[in-house]
Image (tube, rainbow, N blue to C red):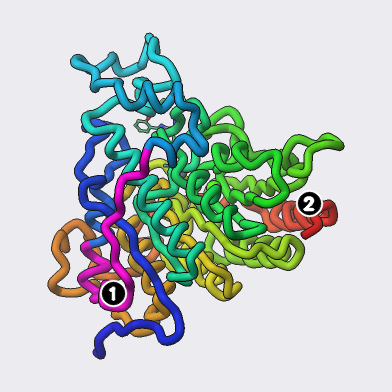
Amino acid sequence: ESAITRPKGYTVSFHCNPDMEKHHFGMTHPMKPWRLTLSKSLIYSYGMSFAMDNYIARAATYEELADFHSTDYLDFLGTVLPEPVPRDLENQNPDLRFNLGGSDCPLFEGLYDYCSLSAGGALDAARKICYKQSDIAIAWGGGLHHAKKAEASGFCYINDIVVAILQLLRFHPRVLYIDIDVHHGDGVEEAFFSTDRVMTVSFHKYDPNNFFPGTGALDDNGPKNEQNPGAHHAVNVPLNDGITDEQYDMLFNTIVGRIVERFRPTAIALQCGADSLAGDRLGRFNLQVQGHGACVEFCKKMNLPLILFGGGGYTPRNVARAWTYETSIAIGCQEKISPMLPQHAPWRQQFRQDTLFPTLEQILGEPRQNRNPQKRLQDIVQHVTEQLRFVQA
Ligand code: ZLV
Ligand code: CA
Ligand code: ZN
């Protein structure tokens, strides 16, 4: 086995901050910032740090966050304190402002630091892309796609993706945002509803009554009125439980391929939420590490400046596997790394199986029933193809 070396001809940068990872949302909360530590430890165990430029992310400044967020919201976020007594489980009286302090978006110690470090990493990544100092920039601590201008939502307080894309737009005429988290990327979609310089596409589990956030139907494509240049620039791919690698890759390659052809982005921002993997605590799909990673591989092949963000992911061992494999794809060493986890990896017992690519049977016992008939997927491709006729680069 030979050492992992730098890819010739291009640069991958890696942006993270250990201070972000030590925060706690609360014992029963599914979001575990510690999964970032586990991911990094596996990435480093494979020796990949030697093939990247590694940066400690700084905290984003108030002014940078205010590019998207309202100052009322930021001021409140900067002053709220953790609740002295945890609220009752059912969250009967969400009396706080901006959707803060409920059970999805609890107030915890160091909340503002956590948010500004996540956004700082995303911004550092965006600047590396803008100044052409990286070809692929990785910010696994970012990807918090639900946060709104003046509202926290779904475990997200600050929308680091929007802030990073706003930075990209200072240098890039057109940015394509792609979201493979199992949840709809509603916050990013809404932020760019009225511009034709950002096209957003989210693949997600869609069930308006039973799955968060309930938005992202196939025909929700941005406000359609004569004056809105952003009309038709939101693509939604609503899916059902149990989708497989083969189906997902067919959809992803066809849809993203056609969007790139039509919209001609000059940069791509890919949210790699790992809750779309089989066995995720909140997810519903049957995706394996290979299928999730194939999306990153396809984007890399487009040969455009690329940012990789994290996002959801609630079974830490699977998050770490996916983001490790995807880091190897960014570097181009995916064929070189061993599918067996390194012997010396810390936290090795966390992983249960000693492979980077556990089978569905290993992950789940019994795979989840696939509720995505081929006909429905064809209809989705057809709708998107027709939608793209309205898009002009
Ligand atoms: O992965 O939550 O369903 C990016 C991301 O996309 C809800 N929240 C809200 C709407 C009304 N509810 C219920 C509130 C539940 C509060 C606590 C949980 C606690 C334990 C286990 C699961 C959950 C939970 N919460 C599961 N799904 C939710 C969603 C929010 C999902 C956010 C996904 C974020 C980082
Ligand atoms: Ca999504
Ligand atoms: Zn999610």
Q: Determine the CA span between mark 2 and mark 1.
A: 41 Å
**Quick check: is 57 in the magenta stretch?**
yes
**Would the CB of label 2 be found within 8 Å of ligand 2?**
no
Q: Position of residue 251 (x, y in %)?
A: 65, 61
Instruction: Check disc 2 and report the residue beneath it.
Output: 383
Q: Residues within 10 Å of mark 1 (few under 14, many from 20)?
A: many
* Range shown magenta: 41-61
Secondary structure state at the residue bearing disc 1: helix
Q: Position of residue 196 (x, y in %)?
A: 72, 49
Q: Quadrant of ligand 3?
A: top left
Q: Quadrant of residue 187?
A: top right
Q: Tags 2 and 1 in contact by the CB under 8 Å rule?
A: no
**Quick check: is 179 in the magenta stretch?**
no
Instruction: Check disc 1 and report the residue beneath it.
Output: 48
In the image, which disc is placed on residue 376?
none
Q: Residues within 10 Å of mark 2 (few under 14, many from 20)?
A: some
